[in-house]
Image: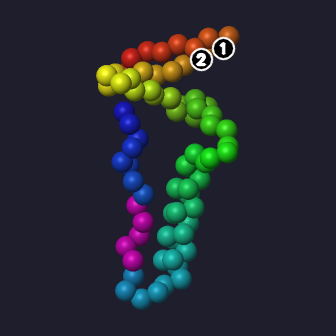
Amino acid sequence: MSSFGTGLRLPVPQTQYDQGSATEGNLALEQADNQNHKRGRDLEVGARGERLILTSSGGTRYELAVSDAGVLSTSAV
């Protein structure tokens, strides 16, 4: 199952500025940003149960896995 589209849920804006609401919104943005992959950084998949799913040109989805011996394998998902 894809995690795309889960979206970021920010608090509803106040009609007047409220420091507490602004702080809550900023915290939500920072937490969501920490979950994003960044350019120039290593990408580690699998440590927390994530999978690397590749899609073929025909639309078939495959999970890429690696054994402790370093052998790569794929399986349809």
Classify mark 2: helix, strand or loop.
Answer: strand
Q: Position of residue 48 (x, y in %)?
A: 58, 34
Q: Quadrant of the N terminus?
A: top left
Is residue 61 something that shows in the picture? Answer: no
- What segment is highlighted magenta in the picture? 9-13
Give the residue type at disc 2: Val
In the picture of the structure, the residue carrying the numbered disc 2 is 66
Residue visible at 42% across and 21% down in the picture: 62
- Whether the magenta-drawn stretch holds residue 11 is answered as yes
Q: Is residue 44 above or below residue 62?
A: below
Could you classify mark 1 by the number of other residues whose Cα lies within 10 Å: few (under 14), some (14-19), or many (20 or more)?
Answer: few
Residue drawn at x 62%, y 11% is 71
12 sits left or right of 27 in the view: left
Q: Residue furthest left?
A: 58
Q: Residues within 10 Å of mark 2 (few under 14, many from 20)?
A: few
The circle drawn on residue 18 is none
Q: Amino acid at mark 1?
A: Gly
Which image quarter holds the C terminus?
top left
Residue 30: x %, y % from top left: 57, 61
Circle 1/circle 2 CB separation < 8 Å: yes
Q: Residue at x 66, y 14 (%)?
A: 70
The mark total stands at 2
Q: Position of residue 28 (x, y in %)?
A: 51, 63
Residue 70 has which mark? 1
